[in-house]
Image (tube, rainbow, N blue to C red):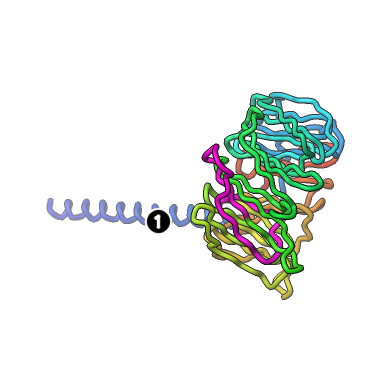
């Protein structure tokens, strides 16, 4: 009897050991599969959706959280994710430009006097300016900042989403400078402007921060002067501003009124991009690693990664997860972690690429159609 119990215990122990071994083997197979899948570089794609453009090549497209917006000299329209038209607005503009943030869109006529403000439900407001428009930006709250210019002065006006005036800043060319770039904080409480000034015979930049959290006063918060020109600016959050220059970048804290980081590169900058969490710079590379070098920096101004590639790109788009580089024949997608996600060619000439709403899906724009693709 005791011998039989020993045999049963031994058999039970053997079964348990085999179960553990089988579980470990299954787990190992799953991990290897996941590792191979995660490191696989996609090189082809399938078309998920295709739509005829029915317009000319002067129409531009922009992805929003809840749909797609297209605009041209004749009007602007928004479709939902299913392709149904949510709204459309006709107008006549000689040189339309669009800015978007969150659920809001603004379209303005550069060199003219009209701005339209929209959300997913349609038009919210319209602005008519007395001075020609040079640049517009919109915040996640729907507040619009507009740079207006005439022969002697520049004005930076703020409007709410209904088109009502929230304030105005006058900047004379002689005393303040010429505005090269503006950046509006997500909550629209702060505005940073990069002005071109001439000092001791050389062109420099004057960075001016304005605070619109109080409706009274001149809104001036701080002024900094920098050597060189900084023609691009963006808020990374409600306080931190990044300024992109000809030779590097600056991280500026508007609230504490100080330059936190200033980085100058030895190589000439070919392209720059900015997301909520990352700064990116592409240089022509001078060694054998690749034709181009891409360096990624975090919000603190520290370099986090470097990639090399050979694609002669004509377009680029980026978010916190990946960078898309493309020309009319090829596309290269880098994940921010460093992995190449896609490297492949198109079967028709492409003029634009946009990430779609679902991971792994992208929109390809050509002269005849829009195609949503899934990479594989």
Residue at figure coordinates x 63%, y 62% from the top left: 225
Residue at figure coordinates x 44%, y 52% from the top left: 26
Q: Is residue 284 left or right of residue 319?
A: right
Give the quadrant of residue 265.
Answer: bottom right
Q: Where is residue 311 in the image (x, y as percent from the top left)?
A: 76, 61
Q: Position of residue 269 (x, y in %)?
A: 72, 64
Residue 278, above or below 158: below
Q: Mark 1 points at which residue?
A: 24
Residue 133, above or below 123: below
Q: Does the magenta stretch include residue 235?
A: yes
Residue in the foreground of this view, choosing between 108 and 18 = 108
Residue in the foreground of this view, choosing between 234 and 59 = 234
Residue range highlighted in magenta: 208-236
In the rendered image, is residue 297 in sight? yes
Q: In this view, does 178 lie to the left or right of 28?
A: right
Q: Where is residue 18 in the image (x, y as percent from the top left)?
A: 35, 55
């Amino acid at each position: 009897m005791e011998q039989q119990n020993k045999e049963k215990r031994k058999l039970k122990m053997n079964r348990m050991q085999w179960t553990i071994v089988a579980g470990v083997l299954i787990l190992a197979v799953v991990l290897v599969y996941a590792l191979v899948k995660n490191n696989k570089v996609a090189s082809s794609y399938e078309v998920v959706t295709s739509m005829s453009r029915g317009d000319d090549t002067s129409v531009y497209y922009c992805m929003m959280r809840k749909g797609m917006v297209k605009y041209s000299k004749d009007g602007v329209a928004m479709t939902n994710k299913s392709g149904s038209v949510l709204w459309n607005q006709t107008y006549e503009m000689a040189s339309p430009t669009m800015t978007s943030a969150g659920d809001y869109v603004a379209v303005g006529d550069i060199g003219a006097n009209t701005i339209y403000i929209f959300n997913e439900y349609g038009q919210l407001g319209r602005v008519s300016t007395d001075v020609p428009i040079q640049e517009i930006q919109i915040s996640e709250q729907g507040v619009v900042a507009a740079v207006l210019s005439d022969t002697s002065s520049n004005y930076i006006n703020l409007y709410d989403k209904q088109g009502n005036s929230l304030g105005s800043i006058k900047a004379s060319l002689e005393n303040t400078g010429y505005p090269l770039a503006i950046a509006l904080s997500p909550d629209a409480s702060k505005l940073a402007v990069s002005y071109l000034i001439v000092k001791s015979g050389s062109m420099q930049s004057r960075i001016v921060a304005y605070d619109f959290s109080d409706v009274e006063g001149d809104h001036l918060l701080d002024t900094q002067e920098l050597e060189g020109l900084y023609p691009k600016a963006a808020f990374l959050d409600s306080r931190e501003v990044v300024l992109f220059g000809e030779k590097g970048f600056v991280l500026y804290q508007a609230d504490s009124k100080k330059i936190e980081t200033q980085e100058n590169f030895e190589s000439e900058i070919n392209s720059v991009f900015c997301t909520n969490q990352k700064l990116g710079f592409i240089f022509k590379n001078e060694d054998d690693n690749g034709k181009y070098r891409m360096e990624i920096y975090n919000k603190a101004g520290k370099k986090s990664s470097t990639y090399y590639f050979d694609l002669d790109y004509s377009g680029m788009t980026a978010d916190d997860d990946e960078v898309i580089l493309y020309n009319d024949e090829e596309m290269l997608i880098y994940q921010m972690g460093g992995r190449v996600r896609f490297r492949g060619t198109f079967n028709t000439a492409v003029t634009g690429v946009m990430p779609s709403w679902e991971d792994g899906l992208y929109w390809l724009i050509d002269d005849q159609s829009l195609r949503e693709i899934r990479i594989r």
